Amino acid sequence: MTRTVLESKSKTVVIGFDEPFCVIGERINPTGRKKLAAELEAGDFSTVEKDALEQVACGAMVLDVNAGVVYNSNPNPNETEPPLMRRMIELVQGLVDVPLCIDSSVPGALEAGLAAAEGRPLLNSVTGEEDRLELVLPLVKKYNVPVVAISNDDTGISEDPEVRFAVAKKIVERAADFGIPAHDIVVDPLVMPVGAMATAGQQVFALVRKLREELGVNTTCGASNISFGLPNRHGINAAFLPMAIGAGMTSAIMNPVRPVEMEAINAANFLMNHDPNGGKWINFAKVLDATKEGTPFPEAAAAAMAAGGGRGGRRGGRRRA
């Protein structure tokens, strides 16, 4: 059974076919968040701290960290992103004890994050372009970490799911050339917006099954892509996630500070027999009860974590050399 092992200094998370769905918190990302981008350029990390703590309290098992700020003072990300990534990784892992997902298109930022990260983070990401494979796969091998493989190459993102499958297969095969096993490849089959392509949901469900059955790999996606441009996006996301889980998807990069999506995931875990005796579902129901009485979801989730003895945060910690 495929198991992708992620680690922080003190916690292990396993992505797998027989494991609870892995929620990777997406919020620490300045893309499309002008206020956060401005804060980061100014050296203000207060929103990063808030997002880290809230996401873990709400159920994120892994946190994605993206330092993709285009500085007004220096628009060259090859110079600005690596030191910012290192600083953000050190900050976040000093606050929470979950594994991290190091997210960048800049190879120098990926390596800076890997050098700063404790444990065994997930690297996000590699695509099917040869130059990208030659840059990223040696880092994956050097640091012995798993990697997200995105199913596009130098021809772009194909609307044909068979082409996206072929790109994923190519990445898995090229990784094997570097001695990287398939269980350390987490494939993102690329979710298309259902508003633009009516078969987008059906495509990804079929692709996930094929990736699982033929390549034996775990899968992930940017869950909110499915609802892009549509009203009541969270309702669509909440329907999509359990259907993807039923098809075999094992993780998603998503916003956990949304109770409707987290309710859907907790219910799906219970129904897939990944929540023995429904203990997590019962605890989550108590959080929902508190929100009905007016407590904001992050506060209710944090209170439940504290009452249950869970540790979502810590200070300090030794950095890996």
Image (cartoon, rainbow, N blue to C red):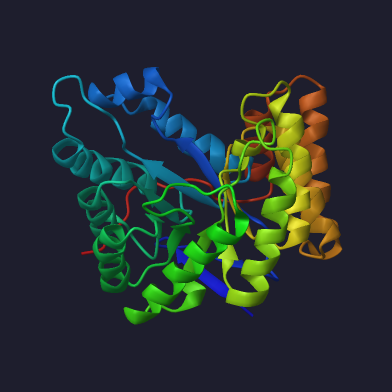
**Can residue 216 be spotted in the picture?**
no
Q: Considering only vertical position in the picture, is 42 above or below 5? A: above
Q: Residue at x 39, y 65 (%)?
A: 120
Q: Which residue occupies the foreground of this view, 300 or 259?
A: 259
Q: Position of residue 79 (x, y in %)?
A: 13, 39
Note whether 256 is above or below 126 in the view shown: above
Q: Residue at x 67, y 53 (%)?
A: 204
Q: Is residue 134 left or right of residue 190?
A: left
Q: Position of residue 181 (x, y in %)?
A: 44, 79
State whether residue 17 is above or below residue 194.
below
In this picture, is 139 found above or below 56? Answer: below
Question: Relative to residue 134, is residue 157 drawn left or right?
Answer: right
Total labels drawn: 0
- Residue 156 in the image, given as x and y percentages of width and height: 43, 47
Give the quadrant of the C terminus. Answer: bottom left
Expressed as whole percent of the image width and height from the top left, the position of residue 60 reads 58, 47
Residue 109 can be seen in this image: yes
